[in-house]
Amino acid sequence: MSDSSEAVTSPFPLTTGRTRGYRPEAVDAFLDRARAAFESGERTDLDSTVVRTAAFPLVRRGYQVAAVDAALSRIEDAFAAREREQALSRRGARAWVGQSRQLAQEVLDRLTRAKGHRFRRVGLLRFGYRVDEVDLVADKIARFLEDGEPVTVDQVRSVAFRMQRRGYSEAQVDAVLDAVVEVMLAVV
């Protein structure tokens, strides 16, 4: 297949030069699975959380990361909206709001801990997220949860931190950010 026909049939732009992108076959397979799960309308093992945490190998001439991530955000939103509607019809608004409020409170409790102590630190010779940057984002999210300060789902999804020795645990910070997205999508 020539490059020009590949560019026409590719659902996402491909990277060029030394830039790496997501492996097209992995992305295509995941999107096919997501489409089938969403169109079936039945409960499957694929939900908004799976979409949010999807990861793909990086390769040369892969799909551009930003384009795929933007599409995944829209797919996650669609799954989350359907999950919210299904939960509302099964349990009612009061139970759904109560569950979302409880998760929001757990997140808020974590984010309002003392600066520098909000998350577990990695070992002495390991790198984790920069503590000052995570604390800054944590403060902003806490103000959103407490006072309604404007923060968008996309801002939370796209936050990135530099690394430092003895930084915060990536897995722990990422889990809390995922919970924040879940709360935000629950109340949209």
Image (spheres, helix red, strand yellow):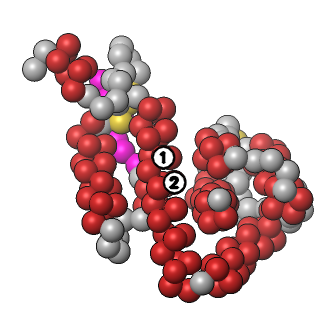
| Residue displayed at 31% across by 43% down | 27
| Residue displayed at 65% across by 49% down | 153
Res 102 → quadrant: bottom right
The quarter of the rendered structure image containing the N terminus is top left
Res 161 → quadrant: top right
As displayed, is residue 93 above or below residue 50? below
Tell me, yes or no, whether the two marked residues, 2 and 1, touch with CB atoms within 8 Å.
yes
Q: Report the magenta stretch's main SS.
A: loop
Quickly name the residue at label 1: 74
| Residue displayed at 68% across by 83% down | 94
Q: Position of residue 90 (x, y in %)?
A: 50, 84
Q: Position of residue 106 (x, y in %)?
A: 74, 74
Residue 79 vs residue 21, the one in the foreground: 79
Magenta range is: 55-62
User: Which secondary structure, mark 1?
Assistant: helix
| Residue displayed at 52% across by 80% down | 89
Crowding around mark 2 (Cα neighbors within 10 Å: few <14, some 14 to 19, many 20+) is many
Q: How many marks?
A: 2
Q: Is residue 11 left or right of residue 69?
A: left
Look at label 1 and name its amino acid: Arg
The quarter of the rendered structure image containing the C terminus is bottom right
Look at label 2 and name its amino acid: Asp
Q: Quick check: is 57 in the magenta stretch?
A: yes
Residue 43 vs residue 90, the one in the foreground: 90
Residue 73 vs residue 84, the one in the foreground: 84
Res 22 → quadrant: top left
As displayed, is residue 17 above or below residue 164? above
As displayed, is residue 162 above or below residue 79? above
Q: Is residue 123 visible?
A: no
The disc placed on residue 77 is: 2
Q: Position of residue 151 (x, y in %)?
A: 75, 47
